[in-house]
Image: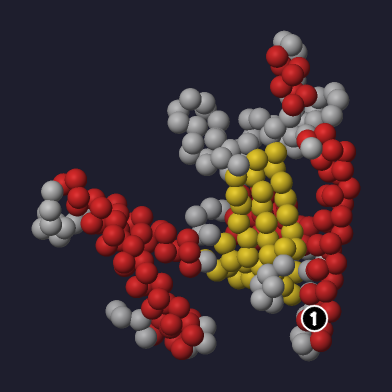
Amino acid sequence: MHRAAGKVSEAMVALNEKDMHGIREKIKQDNRLCGLKDGTKVNVEGDTCYNNPLFNSGGHTPFQGGTIAVTTMCENNTRSKRIIGVHVANKLCMVASRLRNQGIAVDCPNHDGKCTANMSETDVIGNEEKWNEHVARKINTDLNIASFTGDGDSKGHSGVDKAQVQQTVHFKDLRHLGNSLKRAINKAQFSSGMFAGPASKRANFQNRFALSIRARCMSELTKAHKKYKGNIKEITNHMTK
């Protein structure tokens, strides 16, 4: 299966690129049908995932735990949320590994023979700013990104800005916002009487408290968006001070 995938991989990449180009062209057509003055505007959301957690090296290596990063951007103009841009950053190369085992010094991706890596082993795999810039430039061949929704815990939005000529509006998605709130509550130092019981159970109580606060805040924010139809100023004005 691996050998078969290697033979058709380039064709599959080309097919996917063609398909995403078609989706981007369809978005332009839909924008014109909706009567938008600028049919090239698109709202996107994106994130990067890794084959291993970046913090998983455990002190055994100076490098980050991940060796593959896949950055995906989807359109937010429709409910379909179709993928319109992808970039894969890969450090893995079997040819280089085999040559190194033979005592030959090689540096990916510039060695002789077929190299499956597209970045050096010493490059930072978690550079989401760079990966987002790659994807945004691909999208910009057909569309202009009007807004970008990201996780808020990286410099991914900066990469989108670098690829854009015009200013991009940035949003933070609620799932990562809620997780950040939960982590902050778990790290907070509460009074000794806040959570009753032995010390072994207090951490569990605090975690459950954090989960409850996150759920309540997310519910309140979601209801506020629905009631005030996404008007940020109205939502802010009606928040408890």
SS category of the residue bearing label 1: helix
The residue most toward the top is 103
Position of residue 178 measured from the top left corner of the image (x, y, whole percent): 42, 64
Q: Can residue 99 be seen by looking at this rendering?
A: yes
Q: Where is residue 95 in the image (x, y as percent from the top left)?
A: 78, 24
Left or right: 200 in relation to 221 = left
Q: In this view, does 238 lie above or below 136?
A: below
- Which residue is drawn at the image coordinates 56% and 53% (left, top)? 155
Q: Is residue 168 visible?
A: no
Query: What's the residue type where badge 1 is placed?
Result: Asp
* Snapshot quadrant of residue 33: bottom right
Work out whether 119 lies above or below 205.
Answer: above
The residue carrying mark 1 is 30
The quadrant of the picture occupied by the N terminus is top right
Crowd rating for badge 1 (residues with CA inside 10 Å; few <14, some 14–19, many 20+): some
- Between 12 and 96, the one lying in front of the other is 12
Judge by depth and name the residue closer to the eye, 70 or 228: 70
Colour scheme in use? secondary structure
Q: Which residue is at the far left?
A: 193
**Residue at position x 31%, y 66% from top?**
212
Depth check: 32 or 10 in front? 10
Work out whether 193 lies above or below 120: below
Quadrant assignment, res 102: top right
Coordinates of residue 217 in the picture (x, y in percent): 36, 72
Q: Quadrant of the C terminus?
A: bottom left
